[in-house]
Image (cartoon, helix red, strand yellow):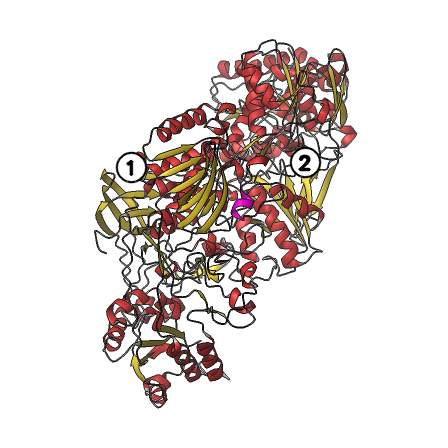
Amino acid sequence: MNNSENRIIIAGAGISGIRAAFDLAETGSRVLLIDKAPAHGGILPQLDHQFPDNHCGMCRMLPMVDRDMGKQFCLKKGLIHENIEIMRSSEITNVKGSPGNLEVSLKQKATGIDKDKCINCGKCEEVCPVTTTDHFNDHMAQRKAVYFPVPFQIPNNRTIDPDACTKCGECIKACQSDAIDLAFEDKKQTLKNIHSVILSFGNPLYNPGETDLYGFGTLKNVVTSTGFERMVSQSGPTKGEPLRLSDGKDIKKIAWIQCVGSRNIMTGADYCSSVCCMFSLKEAVLAKEKIGPSCDTTIFYMDMRTYGRDFQRYRDRAKETHGVKFVRCRVHSVEQDPKTFNPKLTYMDDSGNQIDEAFDLVVLATGKRPQENLPGFTGMKGVHIINNENEFKDISETVIDASAAAVAAGEFKETPPQKWKPIPTQTPRFIVAVCECSTSDKKLTASGQLVDEINALPGNMKAVSIQSACSQKGFEELIEQAAEPEFNRLILLSCNADLFLSKAKELEKRTGIHRYHMDFLESGLPDDSGLLSKIIASHGALKTRNTWQMKQKTVYRHCIIAGSGPSGLAAADMLLSRDIPVTLVEKGTDTGGNLKHMTGKTETSQVKKLLTRVKGHSSLTLMTESEITSCQGTPGNFSLTINAPGGFSVVPAGAVILATGGEKKQTQSYEYDGERIITLYDFEQRLYENKTGFDDKQIVMIQCVDSREEPDNYCSRICCIKALKTAIRIKDKAPGSQITILYRDIMTYGEHEKIYTQARKVGIRFIPYSRDHKPEITPSESHTTISIFDPVLQEKVEIKADLVSLSTGLRPYPNTDMTRVFGLNKTQDGFIKEADYKWRPVDTGREGIFACGLARRPLNGLEAMKEGRASAMRAIRILSRDIMASQMVSAVVRHTICSRCEMCIPSCPYNARFIDQASGEVQVDDVSCQACGTCSSVCPNKATVVSGFEDGGVMNQIESLI
Amino acid sequence: MPVKESAPLRPIQSPPEMCMACGTCSAGCPISGTSGFDPRKIVRLVLEERDEELIQSDLPWLCTMCGKCEYACPMGINIVNIIRELRGKVDREKVPGQIHKGVELCLKTGNNIGLPQDDFEFIIEDVGEEIAEEEGFDTYKSPIDKEGANLLHTLHNKLVNTQNEDLVHWWKIFHAAGEDFTMTSTNWEGVNWGLFSGDDESMKIIVGRIVEHMDKLKIKNLMYPE
């Protein structure tokens, strides 16, 4: 490794590590991404299906601006980017020095197999006599001590598990290439001149075997959430067939038990694990999809924590459309029927009856365990932590967290304009390299028969035979042959084409053949018929690829941010600190957004600091009482019209961040009168103003007022926590007061659970109600009577309240809606809709325009600031470069035959097509275009083509294959 | 003092207010639903200070005090102690069945069934002699009030009174293992019904007697028969 190359080291190659690595790599930073595990991806390679559509979607994290720097490839399988180097089985042992010039010591564990020598023949695994349980399949299957940590990764190297290995030496005997060393000696090295370090450790999962309640590890049909994912995965122990592990029978009835290892002070877990409710909901819906709608699914829960923006509707659909059943009861224990192996649960139903029920499978929604002790260098300057809150987060929030850490860790030197070497028009001359072990018929290649057949073909092809091109020796041989000046096209036939994708850059550099002119073919072992036609097809495609023109556009190093609340300020602060000029457009007269309504000490002081810093920065232009009225242009080159008190002005910008915020909701429900029946916000205000007189008062707080039911069917996320904090303060001021909180589901996600515990401890009473049986309210002269059915007591309770507080939630500002101006989508509830909820949460459907904060979803101030920083990171991908360049494969319009029917424009999923007002032509924004090809398929007269996939080449390929 | 405050926080320092009404206790209780018994509801009623309702009802006496509820309680609430506390507040005349009578007899006579000392000693000796008749046990003798023994062996009144053939097994094992044990001629009762009736005061006296035996006879180890 080149010591000066990797300027940023990221420890932990899970989702957040990968997100941060891509963000930084896209800005030109060199990243070394390491992981303790022998594979990258964290938990994600184990999970095939993601909320909300049950697809994966991890590839949506791939770079979109400089696509040619990496490979557009499944991220679970491989991560290939020029600026990212991956080191597996490694960890940081020490960090010294100061930010910008750190000295980082690394330790890499030996995997027992030298990957440069190994030819992946698999003999070692065959002969290994040791069998152990497979962690990848959540210990539901067996593997050898020599194994693939993730069976489908590329490049995939077998690893020896040092804990399982008995050092019997059978593998050494079987290995033909002398690649095995069982001494397992750690490799240590120190890297200098490191700009910063990002720690992205994640949290370990709770092992339910720690408690004896649910029989995990003893009862075969009790699995964890991860285990269930493996059971429905193609790469799982049952190859995706949802069958029981005890007897191979079909699964028809499944129970999910929530809060296993969470919300349990007896297991040291006075916290909620935040993600398990949605995880189980998704799994229940997935079970219906995989097994069939008749599959009986029940979730046993205490509070369904659907606190994300669109989660409540997902839950409603799970219940109403898919028929998932919900039982509000924590399960005591699981027993097993000795004959059928059916796990049996006992629970209380809504009517207070104890029910015994047997299931085919029980899934334990296992939560987080706190992170192990963080290393001593964690708090150092220049060492940034993703998830310093030590929380479990869903993919969406993890990705936000990662981008927010990346922006703080990045150096963002201005990237010089890319030097682009034009590809000269030349007669194509091919070298076809055939890797010797790439066919199952060894004789075919060894005898040179295939090579002779290729050489006999027309079309300037010269075939050569290479031995094990995947090994270092073979690769060198390949380069030597291909570097001959006579060649300008390369076709490589091997058993693992994807492996060479990661080496394309090196091949280009050392052979002089442009990547655009390379093709990597896979022999498709064991069936190696039709190899010749594959080569002819590839030849046909490559020979038509001639010149390629890179188009470049200068980037305006300037960002416009709409909204000066916490998220907008946090974004501005980050950009300004990186010397990127910012114009803050604020509709109101004052800056700060909801700062005036904030009550949390930490968030208030953070926003105040931001305000001072941002307002005092010389590169800030602040425009109050102003509004953006139009936006033209492409990423890096936008032109915005801003309506300010002095008149209209047109301002150029490289990127735009929408942080237009939201507001507290008002209500007319529950006989709101503003005096004795008030909103939670009013109540907080009274407390803030030090109003007294709460002693001996009966106070009732009603949660979810006008929320989590149509039309505002979403959770506002802040109200439960706000209500509990307020109640605790009242109890503290006036211990004689009686407080009852009427709730549907207490949403104290994560560490906020401690507030709920505290609230109960100080004697606040909690009574749950359902959407169908709301509390009834009758005001009278002296007090307000509230009656509610208490399901615990199974009786109606009447409270004569002196004060009623209504938790009304949040909504986006209806009058600062920027979605029309920017051509963006809105959610049903008027929030700005992002490009992808999970993987691209702060990107919008239009590249270069980002959204954050309350305008996008309900959140608290700290979360809003984090989201603001994340959107700054995403904007810097564009703003840190001098030019935006088109990529090798992208859509092109042939204006001479374009009829301007405009069918392509709405078909583009990336909003990359538009009519150029001046010329009237359909244009492609080269940066936004992701070369998906939708446009060329809808174009009625072939006026739009995708470079590299022109008709000629594709027809050549088809012709050679039929 | 209401039960929610007076019930001892043992073994876990977790007040009943911590209850989040999750239902674990009721789901696991072997008698949930029997005559309206529901541990979660009892905790809730106690929190609402509706102690009197519970004291007047049969509910506290339906519980088997098996502890299955609190074993799984995620908040570590001492549900069994709450039930005991409620039982302790019931008028002693209204304590069901034999329990309170047993306690009274024990305080008076040293055992729950009021067995006189002569009868007790006769039974112990008689059973001991029967054992000595068996092969390999000819040296066996039931020890009583032996100073310096290793183990104090208290007795379940039922084993002495009606099922004394069960004592044979214990003693044979002790003999074969060479265990140096002893029983006492007075206050030998090992079953403390004050536990079940919620009668702390009587419990204390009965336990105090055993402690006294151990001090007097210089015994370090104690065996309870149940």
Is residue B100 toward the left or the right of residue A451 in the image?
right
Is residue A825 magenta-colored? yes
**In the rendered image, which residue does mark 2 sit on?**
B27
Q: Give the range drawn in magenta.
A: A818-826
The answer for which chain carries disc 1 is: A
> What amino acid type should be assigned to the residue bearing mark 2?
Ala
Name the residue nearer the viewer: B34 or A910.
A910
Is residue A348 magenta-colored? no
The crowding category of the residue bearing disc 1, from other C-alpha atoms within 10 Å (few below 14, some 14 to 19, many at least 20), is some
| Callout 2: SS | helix
| Callout 1: SS | helix
Where is A472 relative to B145, above or below? below
Quadrant in which the C terminus of chain B is drawn: top right
Quadrant in which the N terminus of chain B is drawn: top right
The answer for which chain carries disc 2 is: B
x, y (%) of residue A785? 75, 18
Write down the quadrant of residue A299 in the picture.
Answer: top right
Residue furthest to the bottom: A456
**In the rendered image, which residue does mark 1 sit on?**
A377
How far apart are the two marked residues, 2 and 1, measured between alpha carbons? Answer: 47 Å
Where is A466 relative to A909, above or below? below
The crowding category of the residue bearing disc 2, from other C-alpha atoms within 10 Å (few below 14, some 14 to 19, many at least 20), is many
> Does label 1 lie on the same chain as label 2?
no
Where is A485 relative to A161, above or below? below
**Residue A62 seen from this side:** yes
Residue furthest to the right: B35
> What amino acid type should be assigned to the residue bearing mark 1?
Phe
Mark 2 vs 1: CB contact within 8 A: no
Write down the quadrant of residue B38 in the picture.
Answer: top right
